[in-house]
Image (cartoon, rainbow, N blue to C red):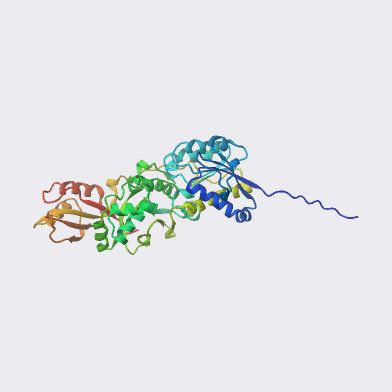
Amino acid sequence: MVERRLTSHTAPPLVRLALLGCGTVGEGVVRLLRRNAEMFQRKLGASIELAGVADRSLKPDPSLGLESRLITRDAASLVARPDIDIVVELFGGLEPARSLMLKALESGKDVVTANKALLAQKGDEIFRTAARYGRSVGFEASVGGGVPIMRTLREALAGDRQRAVYGIINGTCNTILSLMTDAGAEFAEALHQAQQSGLAEADPTLDIEGHDAAHKLCLLVALAFGVLLKPTKVYTEGISRVTLADINFARQLGYSIKLLAIAKDDGSAIEARVHPTMIPQRHPLAGVAGAFNAIYVQSEALGPTMYYGQGAGQLPTATAVLADVLEIARHRCAGSNTSAPALGYPATVVKPGRVKPMDDVLSEYYLRFMARDQPGVLGAIASVLGRNRISIASVIQQGRGLTGTVPVIMRTHEAAERDLKRALSSIGKLKMVEPSPTLIRIEEQL
């Protein structure tokens, strides 16, 4: 008797994506989906298929494999399709991105996004909705471009307590400050060069005034400390007042100037601030140049670690998007009906955090006064600082100026922000000193 064996040839599992927005990053996602299709199938044991693209201006592109049947202007209908597993939101902005993401989650779909502004402002609603329906929200691409900091904080560092996070997380600002430092350009010239090279927007306000970095810092705080912050709670100051003179004086004092996003947890309140910061030239963050990003994490048991790489760009950001897609697809292929919390904490325990007022923040300071070139100026300034409990660590005083004023540079020891503000208000009333001195905070012990 011959034993007969029946062999069934079943197709491998299929994970179907809906892409909302096919701009720079969206095109990168399409390119990598096509280029790495075989590799993704080996890693997943399943195929990833682009089932549809919603974009108002997209046209068929044979080089990308974008046929007319895949393209629609009706994003809501695409999201509602029952055959879609994962919705990749790359529209940006608050609406319709928010509504579409909520609709996707409520209909049992997982979501991947690079929309840091939306998550910073409406993340509590989105994460709670995801938890309610047992779905995932992947947002690796929202901070640091291709730098895998979100997954690192949520998973690799989950066994430790994070005490501080310092981030160079805006490539436009870092490019401008690098041009000022390395090429001797003034701010306006450096901004123009960054715009000419495509590294700065025509309207760079969101970047150079620190708002983009503040949005990203809210997400870093959520993952590092398990608390929710709105961008309005983050002290935010941009780089538009930093001059080449400040860059050069910083160098003389042994520092580099970076736009730093800073978050610290002292156990009772969170410090959350974005501003130009002087950091020691010997520190690894000081060497991060151009459009590169870096996040430096201080962990209680592990100590310091730094994560560095391309902070923007089509393919670096697309790799982060697809890393989230693959992670979610693995859960789906394994038959999991629920997903791990997006922030690494159950949604019910992630609450708004208490933010330390800037007046209570302790820092060292760089101060640049423009003062009349006459005897007694330095003593008068020092006297006011002393009366307000601010001690001076070092002084740089220039020679006679053609305009009758000279810069007086002081680096202070650690002081409370409220004391410094009070001192500067009094110094501004001195007839021998011009109002509105330059203040840059110093982080000596990162």
Determine which quarter of the picture holds residue 372. Answer: bottom left
- Give the side of residue 297 with respect to residue 339, left or right: left
Foreground of the two, 307 or 205: 205
Check the picture and name the quadrant holding the N terminus.
Answer: bottom right
Which quadrant, please, contains the C terminus?
Answer: bottom left
- Left or right: 6 as drawn, with respect to 36: right
Q: Relative to 123, is 415 above or below?
A: below
> In the picture provided, is 260 more to the left or to the right than 133?
left
Residue at the image position 54 percent from the left and 35 percent from the top = 76
Above or below 409: residue 53? above
Query: In which quarter of the view is residue 77 placed?
Result: top right
Which of the two residues, 324 or 207, is positioned nearer the viewer here?
A: 207
Q: In the current view of this chain or complex, which residue is farthest to the left?
A: 375
Comparing 178 with 253, the one in front is 178
The answer, for residue 265, to whether it is visible in the render is no
Give the residue at the far bottom of this rendering.
Answer: 282
Percent coordinates x, y for residue 157 in the rendering:
47, 55
Give x and y (percent) for residue 398: 16, 61
- Is residue 361 in sight in this rendering? yes
Query: At which x and y percent is residue 230?
Result: 39, 41
Numbered circles on residues, count? 0
Q: Which residue: 9% across, 56% down?
A: 376
Q: Residue 402 at what x, y percent from top left?
A: 13, 57
